[in-house]
Amino acid sequence: KIQTSYSKFIFDISKDHTINNMSSIKAIKKSNNVAVESLLASTPEFLASFESALGSHFTTASPSALESQYEAAVTVSPDAINTPLVAALSAYKDLLAKSIESIQLLERFVMINIPKMEDGNNFGVTVQMTVAKALKDARENLLKKMETLLSYYNDRAAAVEKLALEKKSISKSSGSSTSESTSSKEDANEKKESTSSSTEEKAVATEDKAYPFRIMHLVALDVNAYVAAKAGLNDCFNEVIMVLDNVEKNKEKITSPKGLNGGSGHMGMY
């Protein structure tokens, strides 16, 4: 009898735990569905942000034109930050991050709508799996693009360092001394304290016959970063169009994989 009561107690706890878990998942599913609806509704604005970034930061017609523009700035101040390029890279990075976040939201949307395993009538699940793979591939592709942004700053710092620009070294020194003497007349001690400081500044310039080529290398780094960012932003744009269109076209199969259409239907991705 005690064993029966204990078993019932454990069953009740397990049942309550299962109910709570199901309630939590249902709440997440509901909030995720709302977020996805909001994302799909804002598709025009999202896509317009790509066009705005391309129109604001990536309008130079050719790499050679960009090279001339960057070379003029680098010649005047080789160690200065390429402000227009950095602004372009920041805009690119922001859209990459937003795209990755949106894709993760859609991945969760597909995942929480997968039904329990059953025999037959699985076409909708096949659609879900195909969409999920497309989302995963797109996310991984964009994450790799995000990682490549890090290398630009390191490469540019190394290129500037190799320019062997005039370097200044500043050394400072300071000191103090105290002396004590005794007067025989007044039989008293007299203390004197003095301080001194000095600053020395040296400028060291190194002659480098390869300097013109190092400038060209620095300019090439900036041009390549611009071209790669522009291409990457267009790739990101295409990925976002693909995943949003894919989810929109197959939303019914994603949310109701065991729906009324059963095994018939087609996938809008193809």
Image (tube, rainbow, N blue to C red):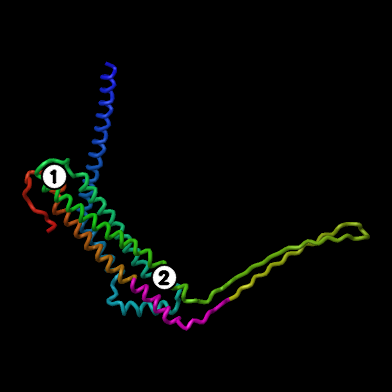
The residue carrying pointer 2 sits among few (fewer than 14), some (14 to 19) or many (20 or more) residues within 10 Å by Cα, namely some
When the figure is inspected, residue 205 is found, relative to residue 151, above or below; the finding is below
The amino acid marked with disc number 1 is: Ser
Where 114 sits versus 221, above or below?
A: above
Give the residues in magenta: 203-224
Q: Name the quarter where the C terminus is drawn.
A: bottom left
Q: Earlier in the sequence, mark 2 or mark 1?
A: 2
Q: Residues within 10 Å of mark 1 (few under 14, many from 20)?
A: some
Residue at the image point whose x is 13% and y is 40% from the top: 118
Q: Is 119 left or right of 40, judged from the image as shown?
A: left
| 46 relative position to 258: left or right | right
Q: Residue at x 31, y 79 (%)?
A: 65
* Rendering coords of residue 201 (x, y %): 61, 73
- Which circle marks residue 256 in the picture? 1
Q: Is residue 214 magenta?
A: yes
The image quarter containing residue 19 is top left
Determine whether label 2 and label 1 are within 8 Å by CB: no
Local SS, label 2:
helix
Q: Circle 2 sits on which residue?
A: 156
User: What amino acid is at disc 2?
Assistant: Arg
Tell me residue 24's x, y (percent).
Answer: 26, 37
Quick check: 203 above or below 51?
below
Judging depth in this view, the residue of 7 and 175 nearest the camera is: 7
- The residue under the point 18% across, 53% down is 131
